[in-house]
Image: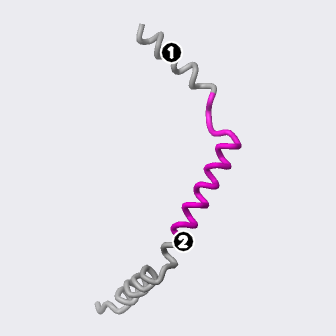
Amino acid sequence: MLQRILGRVLATTRGDDGMSTAEYAIGTIAAAAFAAVLYAIVKGDGIMSALTSLINRALSVNF
């Protein structure tokens, strides 16, 4: 009984392998929007000064 149900579930999901073109378009837009948000955050003054400070400290370490 369980194998029959599992077989039907697998049979209905096998026909939908991968994304369609519309799904790729939505995924690409979402990725671009996420990248734009991250860029805006990193470009802020507070983050830039923190990153610059971190790099300066890393370069001035005495071995």
Question: Is 8 situated above or below 58?
Answer: above
Q: Alpha-carbon neighbours of circle 2 within 10 Å: few (<14), some, or many (≥20)? A: few
Residue 14, by quadrant, is top right
Secondary-structure class at tag 1: helix
Question: Is 1 situated above or below 59?
Answer: above
> Residue 50 location in percent, x, y?
39, 83
Residue that appears at 49% across and 72% down:
41
Residue 35, by quadrant, is bottom right
Q: Amino acid at mark 1?
A: Gly
What kind of secondary structure does the magenta stretch mostly adopt?
A: helix
Q: Any magenta on residue 19?
A: yes
> Residue 4 location in percent, x, y?
47, 10
> Residue 38 location in percent, x, y?
51, 68
Question: Is 7 situated above or below 13?
Answer: above
- Tally the numbered discs: 2
Secondary-structure class at tag 2: helix
* Residue reaching furthest to the left: 63
Q: Any magenta on residue 23?
A: yes
Q: Amino acid at mark 2?
A: Tyr
Q: Alpha-carbon neighbours of circle 1 within 10 Å: few (<14), some, or many (≥20)? A: few
Locate residue 22 relative to residue 3 in the image: left or right.
Answer: right
| Label 1, label 2: how far apart the Cα atoms are | 47 Å
> Residue 47 location in percent, x, y?
43, 79
- Residue extent of the magenta highlight: 16-38
Quarter of the N terminus within the rendering: top left
Quarter of the C terminus within the rendering: bottom left
> Which residue is the site of mark 2?
39
> Which residue is the site of mark 1?
7
Disc on the earlier residue, 1 or 2: 1
The label number, if any, that marks residue 16 in the structure image:
none
